[in-house]
Image: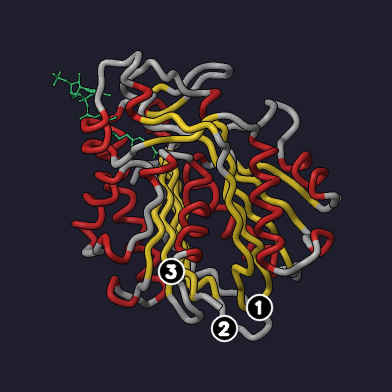
Amino acid sequence: MNETTANNEQTPAGVGPWGLKLAGVGAALPPKVLTNADLTAWMDTSDEWIRERTGIGERRLGGTTSGLATEAARAAIEAANVSPDEIEQVILATTSPDYMLPGTAPAVARELGIDCGAFDLQAACSGWVYGLVVANGLITQGMNKVLVIGAETLDRMTDYHDRGTGILFGNGAGAVVVERDETNQGQLLSWDLGSNGQHVHILYSEHDGKIQMDGREVFRQAVTVIQRSATNALERAGLTVDDVDLVIPHQANIRIVEAAWKRLGFSMDKTEMVLEHTGNTSAASIPLALDSALTKGRIDSGSTVLFVGFGAGMTWASAVVRWA
Ligand code: ACO
């Protein structure tokens, strides 16, 4: 580890005096679908190549970041059975805000009809897990309900004629009402946040530019940081791989997940993936996969769920939650 590498290896587990409950989850995808077959109309590629190298079959385009975020947030608020005005803070993880200035979270709060604190959080594909850890801190400080959203319109930043990046990215949003759990059953058992600013130029976009990526290097670095971050989080929770009921990784590329799981000893059976139908939706991907896992009934009260995010920056973030 060198001086440009920030990590929190000395930070103890983030367990607060109160429990924490992910009380309601919602998702939103814009209706326009771009399939692999569609891409072959203008790109020298094939459905088979894209599926084999990435696990992606289609991605969604269109919408706005605030619009998708609001739709997902409304669904999460309804699922949590709370009123919008009970929300005390909106955290919007995004790498594709509506404007450079202002942030997009206040517009989401406006659309929800609330005027609580609202800010954007930019940690690329790790952003939603960073947001969950921040929400836990706010709840530890006395808040009751925090809305943590991941929302992206990556089609504005993606060149769909570029074979390296155009096959990967899409739009979507996922939102979670994170609530204080007075019963202490639900807990954020541990977390691990980190970054390495040496790797800015393996995945970046200039203002008003398109995403530039060194795919091979992103792949290599991602597998390494997933392994390290998931291991740190599990160790801090005093758990092993066998104690985890479900893993929800950032949905970047099935081969990245498979390579990391091979090193960690996780099975794909315990992993929720939505990548095939969404592509890489950056900060939205983990809450979108969480929504899917809940819809399929894969999470019960008492389940241990591991979230693992990794992305541009590079940043990484893992969190272990005991579900209530
Ligand atoms: N369709 C068909 N052939 C292609 C395509 C394509 N879209 N892209 C590249 N190729 C060909 C190349 O021309 C090359 O052919 P050659 O061997 O005849 O010269 C061959 O495939 C290999 O090219 P590479 O660029 O080395 O392709 P690679 O195997 O690295 O796959 C990919 C590219 C899929 C992008 C891969 O590098 C990857 O998955 N990287 C991880 C990136 C990622 O997931 N980023 C997500 C964002 S990061 C995040 O969210 C954390």
The residue drawn where x is 36% and y is 73% is: 245
**Callout 2: SS:** loop
Find residue 201 and name its label. Answer: none
The residue at which mark 2 appears reads as 185
Q: Front-most of 192 and 127?
A: 127
Label 1, on which residue?
181
Sort mark 3 into few (<14), some (14-19) or many (20+) by Cα contacts within 10 Å: many
Q: Which residue is mark 3?
A: 305
User: Cα distance, mark 3 to mark 1?
Assistant: 17 Å
Name the side, left or right, on which 201 lies relative to 55: right
Q: Are marks 1 and 2 in contact (CB under 8 Å)?
A: yes
How far is the residue under mark 1 from the one under mark 2? 7 Å
Query: Is 173 drawn above or below residue 270 in the view shown?
Result: above
Q: CA distance from mark 2 to mark 3?
A: 14 Å
| Crowding at mark 2 (Cα within 10 Å: few <14, some 14-19, many 20+) | some
Can residue 8 be seen from the camera position used here?
A: no
- Residue drawn at x 68%, y 26% as measured from the top left: 100
Looking at the rendered structure, the kind of residue marked 3 is Val
Disc 2 vs disc 3: Cβ atoms closer than 8 Å?
Answer: no
Quarter holding the C terminus is bottom right
- Residue 173 lies, with reference to residue 193, above or below; the image says above
Report which quarter residue 169 is drawn in: top left
